Amino acid sequence: MPSDTSARCAVYGAPPSDLLDVPEGAVQLSPLRPGSAALERLADAAFEELVVAAPHGSIERRYVLAHALRILVPGGTLTVAAAKDKGGQRLRGELEEMGCEVSERFKARQRICTVTRPTEGLQLDEAIQAGAPVSVPDLGLLSQPGVFSWNRIDPGSALLLRHLPPLSGCGADLGAGLGVLSRAVLQSAKVEALTLVELDRRAVEAAQVNVADPRAQFLWGDVRETRLADLDFVVTNPPFHSEGIEDRGLGQAFIVAASRMLRRSGTLLLVANRHMPYEDVLRAHFRNVETRIEEAGYKIFEARK
């Protein structure tokens, strides 16, 4: 339980600041904020107030809502915001199914629901179980709803897996996710060490199970702020969405970060959607850039520092 009065409020994600007030000192609970508290590990009735930016995916959203209600004291207030076309239309019904009376308002294409946690009658177990970490048989990996490509291998990663050359030395997997690429990289006995860098804590914890290799190290953090250096290689399938919105600058920032991490003559292997504008950034930061494969809407670039 939080130790001071200011921490009796918590926030999940980044609710729209022009629509909702988040008290100063609120404890951050989003797994996409490095250093945040783990929502699912907090004690029951730990907070008096909770403000949530609802995730877009239905399984993940219901999981977050159920845990949010669990950690509220009876009589505590939960306020949840979601865009109408990204879960907002279902928000009231989901909260009512869990046993809450809901008041709602609409503003700026957002649905904002507020509930007072009842003292009894909550139905949370089904949503918590559905959204918990799970072994995915088709992947042979531990995963969790809400993690990127949680129940399938992303087509870009699948393409890079088919064309990944044997690597050697010390390297990094940027935006490592569940560890799919890292497992393949570590099949080379010449790889001495590999750092998996990932923003999503849930993916990091799953990767720690999926990549059971003593050469692997795991870093929960933002690639753009990571201070790795003198690497022999970097592999990446960079994201191009932030908070559900396409952000082409995100992948470009991964390229800049990779160039900073690599030693002279180090190699970057990057897979990306064909329409992503990465060529100019690659050429600005690497001496030699080649398109190794172009297939099914994706490109694999090999760039040397």
Image (cartoon, helix red, strand yellow):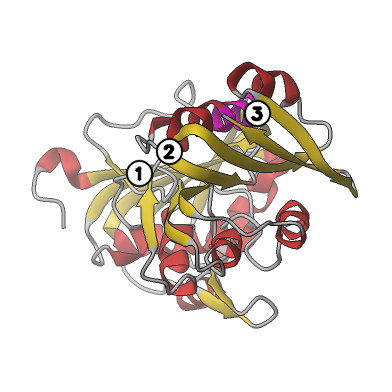
Q: Are marks 2 and 1 in contact (CB under 8 Å)?
A: yes
Q: Earlier in the sequence, mark 3 or mark 1?
A: 1
For disc 1, the neighbor class at 10 Å (few under 14, some 14 to 19, many from 20) is: some
Q: Earlier in the sequence, mark 2 or mark 1?
A: 1
For disc 2, the neighbor class at 10 Å (few under 14, some 14 to 19, many from 20) is: some
Using the rendered view, name the quadrant where residue 75 is placed. bottom left
Q: In the picture provided, is 271 more to the left or to the right than 188?
A: right
Name the residue carrying label 3: 247
Residue 116 position within the rendered picture, expressed as x and y whole percent measured from the top left = 37, 53
Q: Which residues are magenta?
A: 248-255
Name the residue carrying label 1: 34
Q: In the picture provided, is 92 more to the left or to the right than 231?
A: right
Residue 123 visible to an observer of this rendering: no
Q: CA distance from mark 3 to mark 1?
A: 20 Å
Q: Secondary structure at mark 1?
A: loop
Q: Amino acid at mark 2?
A: Asp
Residue 59 position within the rendered picture, expressed as x and y whole percent measured from the top left = 60, 64
Instruction: Check residue 222 in the rendering and tell me which mark sits there, or answer none.
Output: 2
Residue 243 position within the rendered picture, expressed as x and y whole percent measured from the top left = 58, 37
Residue for point 15% across, 51% down: 2
Q: Earlier in the sequence, mark 2 or mark 3?
A: 2
Tell me: residue 215, above or below residue 56: below
Q: CA distance from mark 2 to mark 1?
A: 8 Å
Residue 66 visible to an observer of this rendering: yes
Q: CA distance from mark 2 to mark 3?
A: 15 Å
The reply to whether the magenta stretch includes residue 230 is no
Tell me: residue 203, above or below residue 257: below
Q: Amino acid at mark 3?
A: Asp
Residue for point 41% across, 55% down: 201
